Image: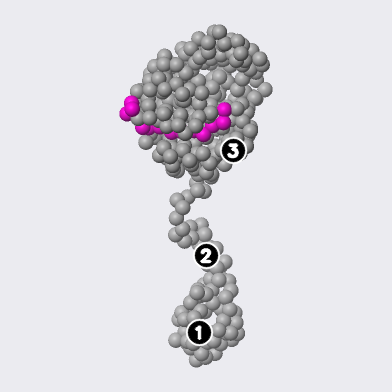
Amino acid sequence: MSGFFGSKERVFIVAEIGSNHNRSLSLAKELVDAAADAGADAAKFQIYSASTLYSAKDDESLGYDGANVSKLIESVATPREWLPELSAYCAKKGVVFFAAPFDMAAADELDAVSGLFKIASFEIVDLPLIRHVASKGKPMIIATGLANMGEIEDALAVCKECGNDDTALLQCASCYPAPAAIMNLRSMETMRRAFGVPTGLSDHTLGIHISVAAVAMGASIIEKHFTMDRRMRGPDHSFAIEPPELAELVRQAREIESALGNGMKTGPAEEELASYGYARRSLHARIDIKRGTVITEDMLISKRPGHGIRPKYISWVIGRRAACDIAGDSWIKMEMLD
């Protein structure tokens, strides 16, 4: 398993910049800066071209603000000549650079500058593209929006045919924004059990609470669209989170992952030891008990603190003689009994 994802201890948090750079390299770098400052693990982009994504004869698909989809794609596509510089800049800032290729040439170009690939939800049925990406032998994150289990199985099978089983799956609802009611977070566990790979969430809902819930449910990866300002014009800004929200998402995710623990019940943590003594109960004398007295049940009471004999041993205490005078309301220790 790659070092990018699959850790049970640390969620891989991806700031999805996508096209929110508005074709400005300086804005792209500003977004990388903000992602790094927020504590995200990775900054992700999308690499596509209008000519290889949509048919020129498609008059029905409309993009943001009713624009022709091909013209929209041309206006927001990440310039491919940026890739080496973006990769180097991310490395300088300490975040992982990667992207989703939407054609084979994009996969080849990314292979030179990135150690990780993403397959976007809409591309999960493009098995030739997935095969080409998998053949690079690098870790792959595959989003599963719109997909059924058979289509997911097909995609993973192609990866395995190429000898690449370093894969992870993201639950995703392909609406922008997505209503919480269709997020189906439990499918992360379904896919994890069915395919034996790390799973996570590509979250298109508004806010951060669904992502935080996914962390609590065992997500290995969280991907969230990210912008400097939701008021900017562009197809993906309105449902993205801004830098303070990303920082809060990272903070909450790290706190939750630390809170999940190892699942074992082995007694008090070091921080609990003070409570262990003063808040637990032990056996106390209900009345003054003289030395030599045979102790009966009505002489005993269970109270805090827990410095004495545990209440579960009351049957052992009953019938023994007091080895010393025991004042009423005192906790009873073993050495006080014959």
Across and down, in percent, residue 245 comes to 61, 33
Q: Name the residue under label 1.
A: 318
Tell me the CA gap for discs 2 and 1: 25 Å
On whether residue 253 falls in the magenta region, the answer is: no
Q: Is label 2 or label 1 in front?
A: 1
Q: Mark 2 points at which residue?
A: 276
Residue at the limit of the structure toward the bottom, as seen here: 292
Q: Where, quadrant-wise, is the N terminus in this rendering?
A: top left
Q: Residue at image x 47%, y 50%?
A: 261
Across and down, in percent, residue 152 comes to 45, 31
Magenta-highlighted residues: 161-174
Tell me the CA gap for discs 3 and 2: 36 Å
- Disc 2 secondary structure class: helix
- Of mark 1 and mark 3, the one earlier in the sequence is 3
Q: In this view, does 267 lie above or below 334?
A: above
Decide if residue 230 is on the left or right side of residue 270.
Answer: right
Amino acid type, callout 1: Ile
Residue 210, which numbered label?
Answer: 3
Q: How crowded is mark 1: few (under 14 residues within 10 Å), some or many (20 or more)?
A: some
Across and down, in percent, residue 163 comes to 32, 29
- Disc 1 secondary structure class: loop
CB atoms at circles 3 and 2 under 8 Å apart? Answer: no
Amino acid type, callout 3: Ile
- Of mark 3 and mark 2, the one earlier in the sequence is 3
Q: Is residue 259 visible?
A: yes
Q: Residue at image x 50%, y 20%?
A: 46
